[in-house]
Amino acid sequence: MNFPGLTQRRIFRLRTAFSLVEMIVVVAIVGILGMLAVPTISNVWDSSHKAAAQRNAQNIASISSELASMGVAHVLPDSLGGVEATARLLREGVTVNRGIFSGQLITIRGISDDEITKASEYLEIVYDLNEIRLVYLGPTEV
Amino acid sequence: MIPRWKEYYEFSFAIGMVFMIFISNGDNQRLNSLPKMMKTVWKRSQTRLLALGLCFSVVAAPVPAQCGVISDILEAFGKWMQGRSSPTPTSPTSPTSNDPTADENTPGAVAAPVNPAPPPQPSELASIIAGDAGGHPDQYTLYSDKLADTLAGFSADQRGRIFGGGK
């Protein structure tokens, strides 16, 4: 087939170029894949954040319980910051000053303020008759 | 209420179905040429894509915690741009460095100023706890003594971080 005014090279280039429809198809594929990926990634991301917060909350509650069993008062009431302040206190580290564990430093390392805030959603201050405690609420939907 | 990501799923499923019908009705040439098409698109816009990637990777930015929908991504991107353009806010009332993020163990880190606030007294603590618990301060005398003892073990700087928050 002859195309007046077009060289063979130009004709070849025209034949190998993409049509608008083909380009739209490619863009649509990329868009669909993107739309499928975003919510999936978001969901996984959300779950992992929640699991990490629960793990941190469990650690905080466990260390708090350990300190309480050693007779070290460390849980701060809500007016003094409550759960978050107590977690920050544990991050600073508490030195046991009585009993067989005297001199031992109990601390939580590598936990940021943001992680403390998220973990505090799974923790609660309980006011007993003579003392206050920090308890883990469990993997409840918060 | 249907979560927004589910709506996206349904929408993308519908588009996917239409696309499947489109490629199944047509000749296989379209499908066969897809890898070639994508390869060529990559080749033609490689420099631009690489430049875009470089722009995003040069400056380290915190990844947004929530990327549920496109609007969230755009919002996070806006915040990121805003964060890049504006300098870190500093408190005009504190001429000395009071950055709680400063690590004491880091060489060259400026030591935080001493917080003059003393640790709370046991009687004060007992009143606070009783106020929160709705009981009498006498109930918490022993606990308050122990708590005051624990708090006395912290430096003013540490107490600032505990009660003030932020590290």
Image (spheres, rainbow, N blue to C red):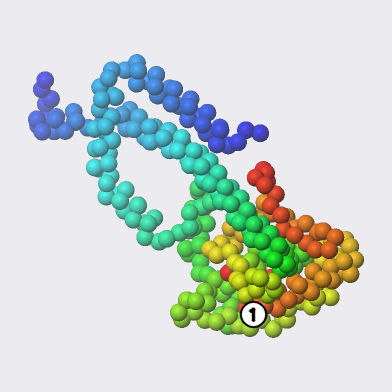
Front residue of A40 and A121: A121
Residue for point 51% across, 42% down: A44
Quadrant location of the C terminus of chain B in the rendered image: bottom right
Drawn side of residue B98 relative to residue B47, left or right: right
Front residue of B134 and A73: A73
Expressed as whole percent of the image width and height from the top left, the position of residue B163 reads 69, 70
Expressed as whole percent of the image width and height from the top left, the position of residue B140 reads 84, 68
Q: Report helix, strand or loop for mark 1.
A: loop
Residue reaching furthest top? B25
Drawn side of residue B80 relative to residue B144, left or right: left
Residue for point 56% across, 62% down: A111
Drawn side of residue A49 relative to residue B141, left or right: left
Quadrant location of the N terminus of chain B in the rendered image: top right
Q: Is residue A45 visible?
A: yes
Q: Is residue A64 visible?
A: no
Expressed as whole percent of the image width and height from the top left, the position of residue B124 reads 82, 75
Expressed as whole percent of the image width and height from the top left, the position of residue B37 reads 26, 33
Residue for point 47% across, 63% down: B84
